[in-house]
Amino acid sequence: MGCLPVTKIGVIVPVYNAGRKLHRCIRSIQAQTYKDWSLLLINDGSTDDSLRICEAYSREDSRIRVHSQPRSGSIAARRKGIELSDSPFLTFVDADDWVDRSMLERLSGATAISNADIAVSNVYRVLGGSGWIRKSYGDHFFQEEKVITGDEIRSEIVPAFLHGHPFPAQFHGKLYKRDLLLASGGYLARIQFFGDDLYCNVEMFLKAQAVHLLPERLYYYRAGGFTSRYLPSLFTDMINGYRIQKEVIADYYYEERNDHASGTRVMLLHTLQTCLKNLFESSYSKDERLRIIRQYCESPEVRECIGDESAAGHFAPSYIRAIQSSNCRFLYQLGKKDYLRSLPKKVLVNAFTKMTF
């Protein structure tokens, strides 16, 4: 791979079959107004021309290096990037996204001012490469530039992670101290895919002494959605994530445990609906899907959540009753209905995704 120059900011881009979307991603990093950066492209077993594209940029720009490895998943790819980089600050960019030309300058400037462990910008969600903005995070956390410290991080930001409130849980749009990343990952070790960003950030924000928030939207995230393919680990990750949340509440929020516990149960019951819909992305037969749904209903964690009247009150009574009675056919039809309802939206998103430049 060769050696990267030691720079203040290391940019890590895990790459898996990103194809021509890589061009916009890499060029947006090359165009940064801040110059003290290096870029690590972690090719995670791509089977398209992604590796060729990465190597072409590496040959032309000494700040860019490529590490190629067998397919290991996004968690392992990011971890490898952290290990290979010597920069004291790291940021992550998804291979099909792009960033504002001032992103590194603004995030680096924020950490210089406040000595923050993490700097966070707002994020645009866009459809494909069209630039059509679909959504950005609201103003609750991003009304103005501010620094949140100590106990305020744990009273304001971390509960938003636990309750599913609109604070960006993803790795992107953030600048981290590398030492904080290296010291974290205990929760992440229990997650295969779904929620990897969330639970790693929960751990890091609990450890952070200062977080600097920037109101500017400096990162462009291509909307598409992980649920457009079948995820066999989705339910297991949901359960393990719920267990992690319970541990965090017990360790850090004992006095407010009832309020926080109810919020995590609402999150689980929402995600269970996603699990039902995601079954229809699989090639399973109807009988196999019904068998899996029964396993969902019998999960002790799911039973615990529907037993919380406050959490259950956020959902249609028919949904809660179906789980209570293991009415798998009702839940099958519910998942199928949600899946069919999502198809037109999927067609639209796919069409915009192809509008790449």
Image (cartoon, rainbow, N blue to C red):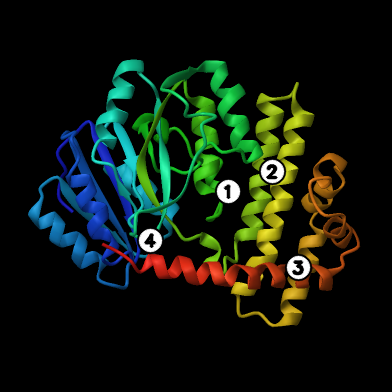
Judging depth in this view, the residue of 330 and 143 nearest the camera is 143
Q: Which mark is residue 128?
A: 4
Dot 1 falls on a residue whose secondary structure is: helix
Q: Nearer the viewer, mark 4 or mark 3?
A: 4
Dot 2 falls on a residue whose secondary structure is: helix
Q: Based on the displayed image, in which of its 4 quarters is residue 272 positioned?
A: bottom right
Name the residue that disc number 1 marks.
Answer: 190
Q: Nearer the viewer, mark 2 or mark 4?
A: 4
Name the residue that disc number 2 marks.
Answer: 243
What residue is rendered at 44% in x and 69% in y? 350
Q: Evaluate whether residue 86 shows in this view.
A: no
Q: Based on the displayed image, in which of its 4 quarters is residue 233 positioned?
A: bottom right
Horizontally, is 95 left or right of 255 in the view? Answer: left
Image vertical order of residue 188 relative to residue 72, above or below: above
Name the residue that disc number 3 marks.
Answer: 334
Mark closest to the chain's N terminus, 4 or 1:
4
Judging depth in this view, the residue of 301 and 156 nearest the camera is 156
What residue is rendered at 17% in x and 46% in y? 30
Image vertical order of residue 69 relative to residue 205, above or below: below
Q: Position of residue 82 (x, y in %)?
A: 34, 42
Q: Nearer the viewer, mark 4 or mark 1?
A: 4
How many numbered marks have been drawn onto this rendered protein structure? 4
Q: Evaluate whether residue 258 shows in this view.
A: yes
